[in-house]
Image (cartoon, rainbow, N blue to C red):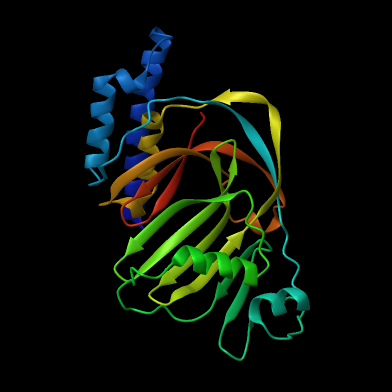
Amino acid sequence: MDWNKTNTILITAFIILNVFLFVSSKNMTNSEYAPMKDKEFAQEISSLLDGQNIKINAEIPDETYILPVLETEYEIIQIDSKLLENFLNEEIEPVEDVYEYSNSKGEALEIIDGKKLRLTLRNKVQDEINENLKIQEVIINFLKEKNIDASGYVESFRHTSENGCIYAYTRQYNDYSIDNSYMYFFTDNEGIYKFEMQRIISVDEIPEKIRTINAIEALPRILTYPEVKNKEIIKIEMTYYSVEDENWQNIERINSDPTWKVIFSDGTQIHLPGIE
C-alpha cells in the first residue's frame, strides 16, 4: 500500500469535509445565506487552493441555476466496411472484436468503448503554428469529406500551445454545452493531424428541475484531482456532463447533470458536480 498517497487522500477529504461543514452551518442559521457574498468563506476557499498552488485568474460565476437533468442517448458506432472506407479511404473488411484499423498511408482508426472514435492521420509537426492557416476552412472541409453532420455543435473551447492547437466543438442544449458530445480537432502547422468524436443522438429533459450550487461551493472538490496542482484556472462555466467511469463501455443511455467546468491555462479541464 502507498501510505503517502493514502495520507494525502485522507487529509484532502478531511479539509473538504471541514469546508462543507462550514457552509452547512451557515445555511442552517440563515436560509438566505449566499457563499459568494461571504468574504470569510471566499478566503477559506482561496487559502485551500493556494495550499496546492492553484491560482484563480478568472471570474467566479456567482449565479445559481434552475435546470433540468437531461436523459441522453449515445450513438453506438457500428464497425463495418462503410465506416472504415469513410474514415480510412480504403476498402477494409471489419473483423469481429477488432477495434483498431489502419490503411496503407499509416492512418489509424480506433473505436473506444463503442462510442468514441479516434482518427490519427499522422504524427504531429513540431513547427510553430502558421498564423495564415485558415483552420476553420480546414475543419469544414474535413467534416464534408468524412460525412459528419456538425449541426447543433459549436466551438466551445480552444487551446493553443507553441506548435499546436486543439479545437473543441460540443453539442449545445439551451445555450449550455453537453461536454460528453464532442468533436476534437488536433491541429498543427499543416492542418488536422488527429480527430476524436463522441456523439449524443437524443436529449430529453427529466420533468423536475433542480437548483445548482454556486461555483465557489464546488471549487473545494478540485482537491480530489491531484493532477491539477500548480495550475492556473482561466475559466469556470456551467455545462452538462456525465461521468465516464469504468462502466462506460456498457452505457448507451445516461443522465447528464448540470456541472461546473473548470478550465486551466494548460488546456486541462475538470468537471465538478453542480448539485449536492
Q: Quadrant of residue 99?
A: bottom right
Q: Residue furthest bottom?
A: 104
- Image position, residue 223 (x, y; %): 35, 43
Answer whether residue 182 is visible to the viewer in this image. Answer: yes
Answer whether residue 10 is visible to the viewer in this image. Answer: no
* Quadrant location, the N terminus: bottom left
Q: How many marks?
A: 0
In this picture, is 40 found above or below 91? above
Q: Which residue is at the front of the view, 30 or 133? A: 133
In this picture, is 35 found above or below 222? above
Q: Residue at x 37, y 36 (%)?
A: 219
Query: Horizontal placement of 175 versus 5: left or right?
Result: right
Q: Which residue is at the front of the view, 174 or 69? A: 174
- Image position, residue 96 (x, y; %): 77, 78
In this picture, is 58 found above or below 227? above
Q: Quadrant of residue 28?
A: top left
In this picture, is 33 found above or below 271? above
- Image position, residue 233 (x, y; %): 31, 45
Q: Residue at x 27, y 27 (%)?
A: 42
Q: Residue at x 41, y 14 (%)?
A: 27
- Image position, residue 244 (x, y; %): 57, 52
Q: Residue at x 43, y 9 (%)?
A: 31
